[in-house]
Amino acid sequence: MSSIPRRVLAVLLVASAVLHVLNAVRGWPSVTAVILAVLALAAIVVAFVVPVRTKQADLLAAIVVGALGVLAFLVPTVIALGGGTAPGTVLDLRSVGGFLVDTVVVRLAAITLRREAKATTDSR
């Protein structure tokens, strides 16, 4: 079984963590910034675990971290836009980039999890 998808997933998780840290620094004295900092830490931990171990739970952790990253973008954005904030002030390159990277993390981890589960059942 190839470990290339897991390595790509690790690189994407590191990129996600960097974008979450940049967004956390930008809005530091807020609860959202603390959540983003914790999410970045979780992404780094999962990024180091995913390519080393071959457990499917690690891929599930990547899915959870990516999904939480997507939520960390969507919830504040929807609340701000619903409150009348101009889209230009909420939607910037770092936050949209983090959203896109996290969506790719979720998708790649899900595909890799499915392929590894199928390979496990086929080898039995």
Image (cartoon, helix red, strand yellow):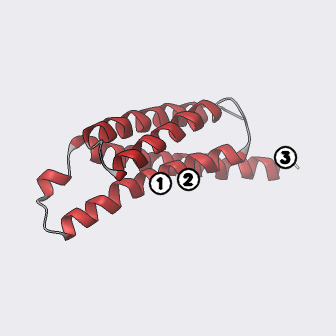
Position of residue 31 relative to residue 84, above or below, is: above
- In depth, the one of 7 and 77 nearer the eye is 77
Image location of residue 98, percent across then percent down: 35, 44
For disc 2, the neighbor class at 10 Å (few under 14, some 14 to 19, many from 20) is: some
The quarter of the image holding the N terminus is: top right
Image location of residue 47, percent across then percent down: 56, 34
Q: Which residue is mark 3?
A: 123
Q: Secondary structure at mark 2?
A: helix
Position of residue 120 relative to residue 47, above or below, is: below
Q: Are marks 2 and 1 in contact (CB under 8 Å)?
A: yes
Between the C-alphas of marks 1 and 3, the distance is 33 Å
Query: Quick one: which residue is furthest to the bottom in this view?
Result: 82
Query: Quick one: which residue is furthest to the right in this view?
Result: 124
Q: Residue at x 34, y 62 (%)?
A: 75
Mark 3 or mark 2: name the one nearer the start of the chain.
2
Instruction: Say left or right for 80 vs 85.
Output: right
Q: Secondary structure at mark 1?
A: helix
Instruction: Say left or right for 87 vs 107.
Output: left
Q: Residue at x 48, y 55 (%)?
A: 67
The image quarter containing residue 29 is: top left
- In depth, the one of 51 and 95 nearer the eye is 95
Image location of residue 78, percent across then percent down: 27, 65
